Amino acid sequence: MLPTVYRSVLTAGVVAAASCAGPPPADADPALRRALVDLALAQRGAPYRYGGRDPRGFDCSGLIWWLHRQLDIEVPRDSLAQYRASRPVPLRDLRPGDLVFFRTDGARVSHVGLYLGDGRFLHAPGRGRTVGIDRLDADYWRRRFAGGGRFLP
């Protein structure tokens, strides 16, 4: 399930964390964030498929679910549940690997993407499109932004 390179990064991070004295860091190991972002970028061009949750086809929350699952991080399956279960992160504090949530169908959260840094996020945008990158400051996304969230330890 988990590619060897990501398993190695994850194992190295766990070993390093276990060998350090004191409380755990407030945020995830940068190597874990990088592994999540690299895995996400490798999915660019995958087709959108409603209910999809693997590289043969993703919907937005299926993409997020699958990415985290590859790194043994449990995440709910749908975007609203992901929003509710994640730790809130203000826009100014987003880091690569965090989630960005949007209200595209009215008042409730209905879309999710993975923040890449520099105002960019990767997501499965919808029918007839493929997994790709957009900007948070694009008018459409800026007006629908609901908040950021974090599942990384």
Image (spheres, rainbow, N blue to C red):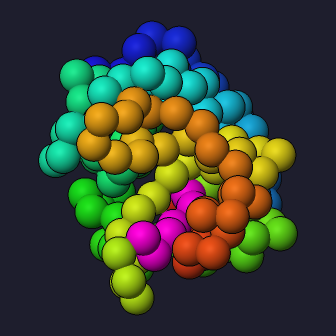
Where in the figure is residue 142, as x and y percent of width and height? 67, 68
Q: Residue furthest left?
A: 51
The foreground one among 10 and 84 is 84
The foreground one among 150 and 25 is 150
The foreground one among 14 and 53 is 53
Where in the figure is residue 11, as x and y percent of width and height? 54, 27
- Residue 28 in magenta stretch: no
The foreground one among 97 and 8 is 97
The answer to whether residue 6 shows anywhere in this view is: yes
- The quarter of the image holding the N terminus is top left
Where in the figure is residue 92, as x and y percent of width and height? 83, 69
Placement of 42 over or under 65, stated as above or below: above
- Tell me which segment is drawn in magenta: 99-104
Q: Residue at x 56, y 74 (%)?
A: 144
In the image, is 48 to the left or to the right of 7?
A: left
- Residue 103 in magenta stretch: yes
Q: Residue at x 55, y 48 (%)?
A: 114
Q: Residue at x 21, y 38 (%)?
A: 49
In the image, is 86 to the left or to the right of 54?
A: right
Prevailing secondary structure class for the magenta stretch in the rendered image: strand
Q: Which residue lies furthest to the bottom in this view?
A: 107
Where in the figure is residue 101, as x and y percent of width and height? 51, 67
